Image (cartoon, helix red, strand yellow):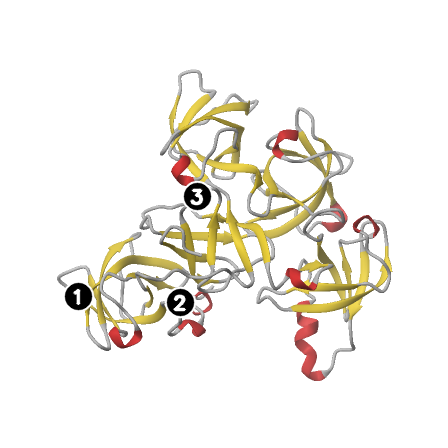
Amino acid sequence: MATAGLLCASVAVADDGIVAAKVIAVSDRRPVVIVDVGGESGIGQNDRAVIFRDDAVVSTGSVVHLESNRCGVRFGRVGKKIPAVNDRVVVIGSDSSGGKSQSCELALFNRAVVDRVLPAGDRFWIDGGTDGGWQVNDAVVVLRRSTVMGWGRVTNCYENSALVAMDQSREDGFLPARGDNVEIVGRVAPSYSVRTRIAAVMAGSGPTQAILAGDSRTGFSDDDRVEIFRNGKYISSARVVTAETYLQVEIDEAFQRQQPQEGDVAVLRSDADSLEPPVGRIFRVEGDYALITLGQSDGIENGQKLFVLNADGSTTALTVRKVYPEHCGAKLKAPVKRDGQNDREQMRPWGAVSTFAGAASHRTVPCARPIGAGKKSKWLAMFEPEGYCLPKVGDIVANRGSDRAWMAIAVSTEKIVAVEIEAGSP
């Protein structure tokens, strides 16, 4: 993915105070770069700046010298790279507040790191607390890279720390350790969608089954349908076969893009009785005709209109021609003409489809998770989009139960870069 795709060309000078620029010189004596925008573009002293190269954030900093048509940015290194001439820069005005997304608002699942494990190994402290939106009884899963180490609940919560008690540990005896990642699972506001992680996959002579982290308190029930994602990409569908002591699901191989594996994300899918309309997936395309994972169980009827949800907030209309219990066949609303080629292009396998046209114009879904912080500035965050929702540059990225707010400054299908803005901004 090239930075040109991450930094939208339309960001040149935006009303929300985001300005796109590039590095024109680098000091050989101080950690300062010269950027080709200045006061005439709305840049102010102490404005924050993020420097990109290819698909990575090279450094972050703030404006320390200001002229009419250029400025100096003092930077701090994020990794091993240092800024260079022609690196792309995004400068964010210090008074920028962003605005409510017109495409979607991302509800971010809290993540923290194990800070200290108590002697018995079944309880540990994490470096997140009420200031970061954590609450008593939050359900969590413990991850070591993509390996699920177990799951439990927050029993005590303080300003900057919380105590977690394990409900389930690995059968091989390995316990959580300092530095492991802790991620909230279950039902998360504002959309109240539910998600967790696959803890184990069991392949045998029959349909593949998987164990999900959590139990019925996590928000899943018998016969619920779930969608499985990996790195933000749809992998498969499944159905909950039991939600008692364990959450066990059966993988629907007919709607499977790849084989699910430990660590994949499992998200509860809306049904016909949900507040939000159900969203299915295109799993086969033949010309203007598509097979979609929405069927009679979702209330789909012959002749009904369905809408492919495009990442830019637009929709592509389809008409249902055949209905089956768990899927349907639908055709483009009108024959594709020469200048309508893009309509057919939107009918790509595994694209999201809804019964509601407005689902593409505004969606409030938990479809992103923070990428490991590393050495990035505390006011900079990077997120991986999940599902079918993408914000636009300048949109607010929500953080559950916290006064902290983030504004997207660069967006692609693989990565969202956001900066912290003043708490309480709209």
SS for tag 2? loop
Question: Which circle's residue, 2 or 3, is located before the other in the chain?
Answer: 2
Task: Count all numbered tags in the image, as a single digit.
Answer: 3
Question: Which circle's residue, 3 or 1, is located before the other in the chain?
Answer: 1
Residue 318 location in percent, x, y?
A: 76, 67
Characterize the local packing of mark 3: few (<14), some (14-19) or many (20 or more) Cα atoms within 10 angstroms.
some
* Amino acid type, residue under disc 1 in the picture: Ser
Identify the disc placed on residue 402.
3
Q: Is residue 42 left or right of residue 171?
A: left
* Amino acid type, residue under disc 2 in the picture: Asp
- Provide the residue designation for mark 1: 27
Above/below status of 372 relative to 1: above
Residue extending furthest toward the top = 120
Characterize the local packing of mark 1: few (<14), some (14-19) or many (20 or more) Cα atoms within 10 angstroms.
few
Above/below status of 201 relative to 375: above
Alpha-carbon distance for marks 3 and 1? 39 Å
Q: Quadrant of residue 10?
A: bottom left
